[in-house]
Image (spheres, rainbow, N blue to C red):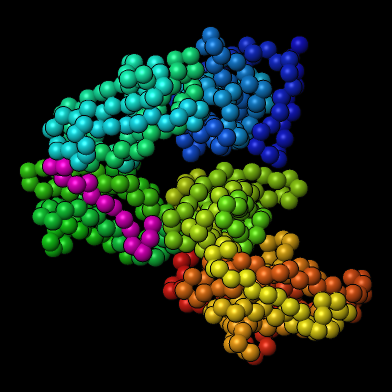
């Protein structure tokens, strides 16, 4: 007897009750789907090679519009087995174990229409790494090597392995793998392969892994990377956009193709758009060509490549430039931090991007454009919103700065207007610990005034006050020297019960505004007065604190001006 499916809107992995015959999942009705690919696409992010204990996201996508999928895995006899997993678009395997390694396929289906489902996807092989010590990778002769020469690559291990895997990463090319037979050598094992003749296509980063034939989905740690540099050929051009590759609709952008001196002609084209090839005149000495888009439009959004001609040869293609146009969709989404705006090294941050608009996905970006992530949206019934959660970390200094998020629908290169920005700081980067005190005291009645004083013996440009709990904004004040101490006084006027809570402060340098000191001692403000008494409530908003550029009506400084640091133009 067939079972029933339970589909939930919240969460990534949905559930299924047991008792559904496997044959019902394999029956296909081709008459329902004509003219499009019936197979969904199964992929792994960030890679199908997953270190043990780490997280991998499995994503299934269908051209037929399926939103619910089921997962299959091959058993030892290469027979597909249903994994009791039903999911919407993607789900996480976290943490990765050896039991998760193997060959997977997915299938889209309609829970309420048992005869409507797709074919099964092509296989996706998930490998777990880090079970054995890393092998070594040698190149003879060592790079750089001239084009046309011969090179031998050697993977070696102190242990005996039957298989070595050479993994190659090249620019704009899918990762490639080469399996090599291991041979006994010096009490261990090794495998050799020759590259002859070497060409520019061999350039890239090489790593090797070792594996046992009995556990082909379980690999060692990777060897140290080997960068293959091939000389004697034209260098690949570099394609970039100024002022950046994320551009507001109607703005100006310049696409720059940089090659080598002496190049005669440059060519730029948009991938997938017929008739887009354009010839660019190089600027002296010939290593750069520019293409100006004075008013960018939606048709300009997409992926671009360039190449150049230097007689008698033509260069290879450049890196892919992804040009994004923003402002296409309204309204702008809302970005919040579910952890804190002040983090510590090694911590995991969680951002939430949400909107009442039905966006297919959201994008989280960092202002320097060195960070950008796309995530499918999910509908949350309790809030009636579409949202995506972005888990980031372990946190390092590179994760600090200004973050925004965008929504997108049909094209990942056409985004909404940006959300309001969030500024992320990291504590423990300046080697001092300020002190925080309260005047006249930490217990007060509603309607009284109170001053929080942050002090340090070190010379600091400003101080930052934070309130624990939900991710409040921060208040910044410039420091003043008084009684041989650098300090800032945060004044709260006419406090209410909502001012109560735990506060900490940090010191900051003007040149490194997102790197803070260690936190001060915690101070708890206790405000007496009934929350139901209208006279105990302030008419002004409570300090979910001001952003760096403004001050709060409720939080004022005593003879101190708020920080308004100039970081140059802000990207929107």
Q: Is residue 240 magenta?
A: yes
Identify the residue at horizontal 22%, vertical 46% (top origin).
236
Identify the residue at horizontal 25%, vertical 38% (top origin).
228
Q: Is residue 238 magenta?
A: yes
**Residue 127 appears in view:** no
Residue 187, by quadrant, is top left
**Viewer-side residue, 225 vs 172:** 225
In percent of width and height, residue 128 lies at: 51, 28
Identify the residue at horizontal 56%, vertical 25% (top origin).
98
Q: Is residue 424 left or right of residue 288?
A: right
In percent of width and height, residue 371 lies at: 47, 53
In percent of width and height, residue 161 lies at: 41, 18
The image shows residue 23, relative to residue 65, as above or below, that is above
Residue 26, by quadrant, is top right
Identify the residue at horizontal 65%, vertical 28% (top origin).
86
Q: How many marks?
A: 0
In percent of width and height, residue 89 lies at: 58, 35
**Viewer-side residue, 529 vs 9:** 529
Residue 273, by quadrant, is top left
Q: Quadrant of the N terminus?
A: top right
**Region of the chain picked out in magenta, as a range:** 230-245
The image shows residue 87, relative to residue 441, as above or below, that is above
**Residue 482 appears in view:** yes
Q: Is residue 548 left or right of residue 520?
A: left
**Viewer-side residue, 285 vs 485:** 485
């Amino acid at each position: 007897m067939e079972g029933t499916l339970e589909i939930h809107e919240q969460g990534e992995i949905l559930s299924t009750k047991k008792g559904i015959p496997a044959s019902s999942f394999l029956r296909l009705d081709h008459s329902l789907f004509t003219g499009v690919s019936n197979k969904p696409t199964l992929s792994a992010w960030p890679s199908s090679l997953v270190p043990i204990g780490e997280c991998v996201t499995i994503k299934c996508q269908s051209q037929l519009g399926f939103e619910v999928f089921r997962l299959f895995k091959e058993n030892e006899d290469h027979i597909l087995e249903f994994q009791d997993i039903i999911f919407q678009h993607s789900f996480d395997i976290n943490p990765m174990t050896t039991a998760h390694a193997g060959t997977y396929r997915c299938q889209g289906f309609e829970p309420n229409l048992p005869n409507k489902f797709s074919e099964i996807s092509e296989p996706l092989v998930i490998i777990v790494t880090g079970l054995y010590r890393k092998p070594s990778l040698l190149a003879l002769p060592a790079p750089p090597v001239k084009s046309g020469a011969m090179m031998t690559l050697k993977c070696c291990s102190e242990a005996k392995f039957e298989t070595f895997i050479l993994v190659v990463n090249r620019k704009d090319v899918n990762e490639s793998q080469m399996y090599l037979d291991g041979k006994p050598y010096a009490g261990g094992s090794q495998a050799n392969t020759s590259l002859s003749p070497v060409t520019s296509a061999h350039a890239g980063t090489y790593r090797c892994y070792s594996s046992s034939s009995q556990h082909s989905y379980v690999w060692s740690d990777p060897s140290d990377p080997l960068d293959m540099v091939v000389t004697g050929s034209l260098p690949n051009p570099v394609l970039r956009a100024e002022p950046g590759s994320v551009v507001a609709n109607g703005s100006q952008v310049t696409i720059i193709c940089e090659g080598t001196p002496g190049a005669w002609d440059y060519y730029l084209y948009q991938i997938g758009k017929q008739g887009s090839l354009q010839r660019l005149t190089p600027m002296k000495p010939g290593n750069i060509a520019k293409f100006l888009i004075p008013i960018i439009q939606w048709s300009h959004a997409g992926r671009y490549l360039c190449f150049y001609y230097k007689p008698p040869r033509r260069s290879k293609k450049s890196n892919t430039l992804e040009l994004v146009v923003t402002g296409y969709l309204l309204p702008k989404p809302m970005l919040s931090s579910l952890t804190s705006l002040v983090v510590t090294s090694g911590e995991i941050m969680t951002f939430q991007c949400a909107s009442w608009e039905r966006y297919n996905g959201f994008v989280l970006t960092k202002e320097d454009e060195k960070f950008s992530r796309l995530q499918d949206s999910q509908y949350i019934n309790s809030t009636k919103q579409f949202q995506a959660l972005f888990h980031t970390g372990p946190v390092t200094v590179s994760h600090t700065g200004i973050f925004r998020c965008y929504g997108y629908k049909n094209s990942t290169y056409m985004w909404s207007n940006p959300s309001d920005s969030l500024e992320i700081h990291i504590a423990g980067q300046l080697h001092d610990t300020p002190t925080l005190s309260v005047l006249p005291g930490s217990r007060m009645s509603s309607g009284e005034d109170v001053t929080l004083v942050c002090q340090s013996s070190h010379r600091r440009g400003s101080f930052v006050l934070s309130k624990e709990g939900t991710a409040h904004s921060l208040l910044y004040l410039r420091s003043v020297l008084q009684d041989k101490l650098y300090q800032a006084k945060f004044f709260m006027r006419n406090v209410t019960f909502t001012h109560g809570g735990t506060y900490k402060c940090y010191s900051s340098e003007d040149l490194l505004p997102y790197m803070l000191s260690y936190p001060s001692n915690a101070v708890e403000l206790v405000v007496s007065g009934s929350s139901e008494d209208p006279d105990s409530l302030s008419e002004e908003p409570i300090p979910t604190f001001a952003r760096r550029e403004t001050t709060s009506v409720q939080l004022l400084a005593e003879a101190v001006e708020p920080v308004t640091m100039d970081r140059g133009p802000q990207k929107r």
